[in-house]
Amino acid sequence: MKPHYLRAWRKNRGLTQKQLAERMEKEPGEQLMSYVTVSNIERGDQSPTLEQLQALAIALDVTVTTLIDNDPDKDGEVIDLLGRITDKNRATVLAMLKAAVG
């Protein structure tokens, strides 16, 4: 698997590996992975399954693509703000972005 930003996103969200693991459940009360698995994935010792990647992204409130491709230290605030765009404010936000970046 290509490098990812799991550790960075976890830290950006202020979570420990244990807290992140606890957020992911297969079914209510049934944990999807342990904090040891989270640690192994972060270190690159284990590749996550698609189910694990999806659960990690949901637990961190990002998309799978964002989790893999975007460094939260560079892009996190922008990504979080983009997630707050609604249909009501989309046109205004787009106009402001266009004006800001030219």
Image (cartoon, rainbow, N blue to C red):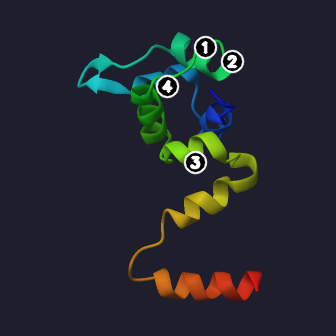
- The label nearer to you, 4 versus 2, is 2
Cβ–Cβ below 8 Å for labels 3 and 4? no
Compared across the picture, whether 49 is left or right of 15 comes to left
Please name the amino acid that badge 1 sits on: Asn
Figure check: 70 above or below 41: below
Q: Residue at x 59, y 19 (%)?
A: 41
The residue that mark 2 highlights is 43
Q: Secondary structure at mark 3?
A: helix
Q: CA distance from mark 2 to mark 3?
A: 18 Å
The residue that mark 4 highlights is 19
The residue that mark 1 highlights is 40
Please name the amino acid that badge 3 sits on: Thr
The residue that mark 3 highlights is 66
Figure check: 101 above or below 34: below
N-term-proximal mark, 3 vs 1: 1
Q: Residue at x 60, y 34 (%)?
A: 10
Please name the amino acid that badge 4 sits on: Gln
Figure check: 14 above or below 86: above
